[in-house]
């Protein structure tokens, strides 16, 4: 539903949860470890190579667009945005 997707992308509660989750993930040593932990917690499965490629592409493009934020905050902000994308997907929203 488009309404649900907009909720997950714009709601302050979702932003707060994704920011907290991103801060937790930033304690891990690298993006691959962060991705593996996020998928373990969110989907109870390891990420595929396609998931990894999508994460790399998203983080790269999103971080490049964060020109006004402090350099040290860009990775955390980009991760929070990536987590919101994952939270808005069917795999997270619906239980099979």
Image (cartoon, rainbow, N blue to C red):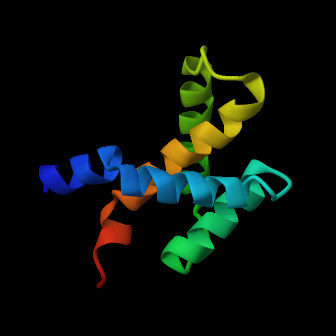
Q: Inspect this view and state whether residue 65 appears.
A: yes
Residue 89 image point, x, y percent: 34, 59
Q: Residue at x 67, y 31 (%)?
A: 74
Residue 73 image point, x, y percent: 70, 33
Q: Residue at x 70, y 61 (%)?
A: 24
Q: In the rendered picture of this protein, how many numbered marks are placed on residues?
A: 0
Q: Given the current orientation, which residue lies at the most extreme top position?
A: 67
Which quadrant: the C terminus? bottom left
Which quadrant: the N terminus? bottom left
Q: Residue at x 28, y 75 (%)?
A: 94
Above or below residue 17? Residue 30 is above
Residue 49 image point, x, y percent: 61, 56
Q: Given the current orientation, which residue lies at the most extreme right position?
A: 29
In the drawing, does residue 28 fall left or right of residue 64?
Answer: right
Residue 58 image point, x, y percent: 53, 37
In the drawing, does residue 49 fall left or right of residue 24?
Answer: left
Q: Residue at x 60, y 15 (%)?
A: 68
């Amino acid at each position: 539903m488009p309404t649900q997707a907009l909720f997950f992308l714009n709601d302050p509660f979702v932003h707060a949860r994704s920011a907290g989750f991103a801060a937790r993930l930033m304690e891990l040593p690298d993006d691959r470890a962060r991705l593996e932990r996020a998928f373990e917690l969110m989907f109870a499965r390891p990420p595929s190579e396609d998931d990894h490629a999508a994460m790399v592409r998203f983080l790269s493009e999103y971080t490049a667009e964060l020109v006004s934020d402090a350099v040290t905050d860009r990775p955390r902000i980009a991760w929070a945005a990536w987590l919101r994308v994952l939270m808005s997907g069917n795999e997270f929203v619906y239980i099979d």
